[in-house]
Each structure stands twice: as structure tokens, then as C-alpha cells.
């Protein structure tokens, strides 16, 4: 897996290469770039798909001491990632907390971004998102030893399938969730960093409400894809986001939970393909 040294530390990422339109894909807490594997496999024949593993708990390399792990800090890290790779006119896609990062960048102007895709993501007052997000936020406040013990239990499949863990976000991909959870219980430096990240990420519970106020100024094409039966991300939030963004289209997806890249990867990939082929990026 390629790596790049950024101001906060070393980031691993996947890159399919190629000369098609560039899609950069962002993941949720306690996940890595492999969340998007099935989507990138479907899109890569005509697109260059780049997916960084952000320092959100499933990463394998600790960041530098003092790195800003708040959500705005992660957004700045993504902007730096685009700069360092020289990626322009990017279609920036985010699922779950990755979508919150996309909103922060869109609200800040995002000069290298030509389109955005928001797939069942944190928005408005749903932050931390749902029961799963609130449980993670509380776990991040535990002393390091207790946090590690709590995360250790997630190596057991019945506990991973609970609503407070991965049970509500997805009905598929248990092998992936088992892999994502490994760094926290096995790497003390990642465990400490993840607890710090959770505290920083959810310190400002009104962050996305303020961010939403700036979204009407984002004049580039947007695709909002939402799971209609989502118990973590309220379906009405998808409709509200599509209404706020001036050049947005909405697709509601059946038979999926919040993690649409796992629940309906083929449908999501096809929606993104149609979106990139039917919209024009205005050079800035």
C-alpha cells in the first residue's frame, strides 16, 4: 500500500491509477480505506480511485505527537493529501463520518474539489451519529486501560453485531469489521491516539449545524445517496442536504444500512459513474 508523509504523520492509501476522472473516497470511524474496495473495483475501469486511511482508529501508523485529530483537523489533512498528490477536479466522496469531512471541505471552498458525493453521513444535529456514534464518543472518554478493554471485546463477533457497534451500520462485511478493529486492542499507541481522536472529534456537537449554514454557497455538482431504512443516519437528513446544496441530486437506496459501500456497492458505484459522466466541472 502506498504511503505519503503529511504534516500530521504518514498516511497509507490505495490508488487504482489510470487517467479517468479522479474520485477520492473517505471512510468512517474505526474503518480504513478497504470500506470502498467493492466500489473502487466497479469504478476503476473508467476512473482513478484514491482512498486514504485516515487516523480514525483503524490506521496502523500513529500520527506525530500533537497532531490535530479534531474533525476540522482531519479535513485539513485531506486537503493537504489532495495538494501533495496534485489531485485536481476531484470527486470527493464520503460515507458516514467521511461525509462530515466532505461537508467541512465543501463549506470551506475546497479548491481542488469539483464534485461531492455524500453517502448516508453525519449531518446537522446527528453528531455523534446515532447510537453507534454516541457509544464511541462515550468510550473515548474512558481511561486508556478501560478504553482498550472495551475495544478488546469488539474482537468477538456477537459483540461486533450489537447495535452499539457495527450491527446497525451494516448487515454485511463482518470480516472487514473484524480487521478494522485490530489496531486499537493490539497497538497501544493507536489505542491512545484513537481515544484522543474520539474526544477531539466530538468535542463540538454543533459543528455540523454551523457547517450546514455554509453549504448553500457550494455551487458545484453534488450527489446525495441515502439508505432509506437507515437507523443511524436519519433519511430526512439526506433530503435536507440535497435541498441545501444548489446543484444536488438525491438517490435513496433500499436494502442497505448506513455503510452503503458494504450494503449496496454496485448500486453506489453505478450512481457515482452516472454522476461523474453527466455533470461538468467548472474550472476554478
Image (cartoon, grey):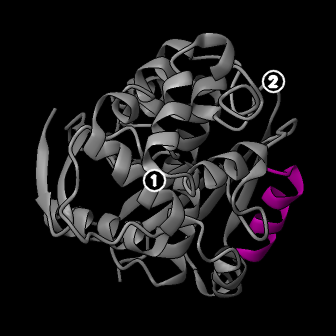
**Residue at image point 26% right, 46% down:** 189
Residue 238 relative to residue 79: left or right: right
Q: Position of residue 113 (x, y in %)?
A: 40, 69
Q: In terms of depth relative to the viewer, which is nearer, 47 or 261?
A: 261
Q: 123 or 23, which is in the foreground?
A: 123
Magenta-colored stretch includes residue 59 = no
Q: Is residue 208 left or right of residue 40?
A: right
Assess whether residue 242 is covered by the magenta stretch: yes
Relative to residue 211, is residue 281 depicted above or below?
above
Quarter of the image where one finds residue 255: top right
* Element type at mark 1: helix
Residue at x-position 43% and y-position 48%: 144
Q: How many marks?
A: 2
Viewer-closest of 169 and 80: 169
* CA gap, disc 1 and disc 2: 33 Å
- Nearer mark to the viewer, of 1 and 2: 1
> Where 242 falls versus 194 (above or below)?
below
Can residue 279 be spotted in the picture?
Answer: no
Majority secondary structure of magenta residues: helix
- Which label sits on residue 255? 2
Residue at mark 1? 195
Q: Quadrant of residue 123?
A: bottom right
Q: Do we see residue 120 in this rendering?
A: yes
| Residue at disc 2, secondary structure | loop
| Label 1 Cα neighbours within 10 Å, binned few <14 / some 14-19 / many ≥20 | many
Quarter of the image with the N terminus is top left
Q: Position of residue 275 (x, y in %)?
A: 57, 49
Q: Residue 240: x, y in percent?
A: 83, 67
Instruction: Residue 165: give x, y in percent of width and height.
Output: 67, 32
Q: Residue at x 56, y 33 (%)?
A: 150
Quadrant containing the C terminus is: bottom left
Stretch of the chain drawn in magenta: 233-245
Amino acid at each position: 500500500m502506498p504511503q505519503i508523509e503529511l504534516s500530521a504523520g504518514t498516511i497509507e492509501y490505495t490508488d487504482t491509477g489510470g487517467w479517468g476522472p479522479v474520485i477520492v473516497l473517505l471512510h468512517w470511524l474505526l474503518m480504513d480505506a478497504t470500506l470502498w474496495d467493492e466500489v473502487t473495483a466497479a469504478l476503476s475501469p473508467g476512473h482513478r480511485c484514491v482512498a486514504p486511511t485516515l487516523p480514525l482508529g483503524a490506521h496502523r501508523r500513529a500520527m506525530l505527537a500533537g497532531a490535530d485529530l479534531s474533525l476540522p483537523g482531519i479535513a485539513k489533512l485531506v486537503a493537504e493529501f489532495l495538494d501533495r498528490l496534485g489531485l485536481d477536479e476531484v470527486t470527493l466522496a464520503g460515507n458516514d463520518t467521511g461525509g462530515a469531512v466532505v461537508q467541512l471541505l465543501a463549506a470551506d471552498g475546497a479548491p481542488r474539489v469539483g464534485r461531492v458525493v455524500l453517502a448516508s453521513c453525519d449531518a446537522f444535529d446527528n453528531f455523534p451519529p446515532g447510537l453507534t456514534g454516541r457509544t464511541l464518543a462515550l468510550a473515548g472518554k474512558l481511561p486508556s486501560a478501560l478504553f482498550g478493554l472495551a475495544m478488546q471485546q469488539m474482537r468477538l463477533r456477537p459483540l461486533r453485531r450489537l447495535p452499539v457497534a457495527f450491527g446497525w451500520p451494516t448487515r454485511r462485511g463482518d470480516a472487514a469489521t473484524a480487521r478494522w478493529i485490530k489496531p486499537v486492542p493490539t497497538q497501544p499507541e493507536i489505542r491512545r491516539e484513537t481515544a484522543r481522536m474520539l474526544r477531539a472529534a466530538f468535542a463540538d456537537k454543533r459543528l455540523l449545524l454551523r457547517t450546514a449554514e455554509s453549504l448553500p454557497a457550494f455551487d458545484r455538482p453534488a450527489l446525495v445517496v441515502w439508505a432509506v431504512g437507515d437507523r443511524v443516519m436519519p433519511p430526512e437528513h439526506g433530503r435536507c442536504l440535497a435541498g441545501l446544496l444548489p446543484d444536488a441530486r438525491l438517490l435513496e437506496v433500499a436494502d442497505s444500512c448506513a455503510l452503503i459501500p458494504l450494503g449496496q456497492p454496485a448500486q453506489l458505484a453505478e450512481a457515482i459513474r452516472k454522476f461523474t459522466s453527466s455533470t461538468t466541472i467548472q474550472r476554478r
